[in-house]
Amino acid sequence: MNPRLFDHRTEDAAALAALHATSFPDAWSAASFRDLFATPGVFAFLLPNGFILARAAGGEAEILTLAVTPSARRQGLARALVRAAAAHAEMLGAETLFLEVATHNGPAVGLYTGLGFAKAGTRKAYYAGQDAHVLKVILPLPNPPDFA
Ligand SMILES: CC(C)(COP(=O)(O)OP(=O)(O)OC[C@H]1O[C@@H](n2cnc3c(N)ncnc32)[C@H](O)[C@@H]1OP(=O)(O)O)[C@@H](O)C(=O)NCCC(=O)NCCS
């Protein structure tokens, strides 16, 4: 199933807040999603069991959040969401894609490095006192490795 672009002008941000709450202890409210969509360049892609929120501006893009519901993990959904967001960001003029991820978040670090992201820096005490990696990739995302 392909992720679809979320239409924040007609769709209810409560759907994103509900998905976010399945994956983060500090859940973001529907109102905070609506505020984010008021920022230029913010967009989301949605699947029934996950979503990604990103922003593209000034030739750069950033992943703001990404969540897949626990029961739907390890099926490639997050990889599909990142690929959709990267392609859309590139279409909006972004040449690089960044994100911050807690250093202890093994699943997310594995996801991003597997897609070709590399470490571009560290932010100390970024998430509730935890350090975060800054990861970066030049768009377009590299093709998947050839396992043949
Ligand atoms: C991180 C998260 C989005 C991954 O979602 P997912 O749909 O399970 O990820 P995918 O199935 O697309 O996995 C793609 C790759 O990521 C890596 N990965 C994903 N989950 C992993 C895990 N639990 N352990 C190790 N590697 C993992 C693997 O390399 C995987 O490829 P493989 O399954 O072929 O080995 C999900 O675990 C999640 O929502 N976590 C809580 C919220 C969060 O941390 N968001 C990211 C913040 S930046």
Image (cartoon, rainbow, N blue to C red):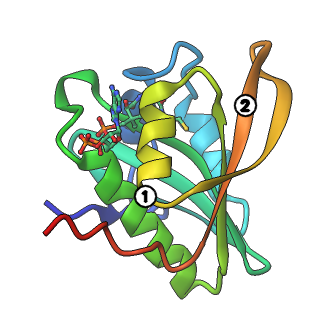
Q: What residue is disc 1 on?
A: 115
On screen, residue 140 above or below 112:
below
Asked if ligand 1 lies within 8 A of label 1, the reply is no
Q: Amino acid at mark 1?
A: Leu
Q: Residue at x 50, y 80 (%)?
A: 140
Q: Residue at x 55, y 81 (%)?
A: 90
Using the image as rendered, state which of residue 31 and residue 146 is in the foreground: 146
Q: Is residue 49 above or below residue 91?
A: above
Query: How far across and how far down the image is residue 30, in percent?
Result: 53, 35
Q: Residue at x 38, y 65 (%)?
A: 83
Q: Describe the element under mark 2 as helix, strand or loop.
A: strand
Q: Which residue is mark 2?
A: 132
Q: Ligand 1 closer than 8 Å to the CB at disc 2?
A: no
In the image, what residue occupies the spot 34% across and 47% down?
78
| Number of numbered discs on residues | 2
Q: Identify which amino acid the numbered label 2 is placed on.
A: Ala
Residue 77 higher or lower than 80, as above or below: above
Dividing the image into 4 quarters, which one contains the C terminus?
Answer: bottom left
Q: In this orientation, which residue lies closer to the viewer: 90 or 14? A: 90
Crowdedness near tag 2: few (<14), some (14–19) or many (≥20) residues, C-alpha within 10 Å: many
Tell me the SS state at disc 1. Answer: loop
Q: Earlier in the sequence, mark 1 or mark 2?
A: 1
Q: CA distance from mark 1 to mark 2?
A: 18 Å
The x, y position of residue 6, in whole percent, is 39, 61
Percent position of residue 82, x then y: 42, 58
Left or right of 101: which side holds 84?
Answer: left
Tag on residue 98? none
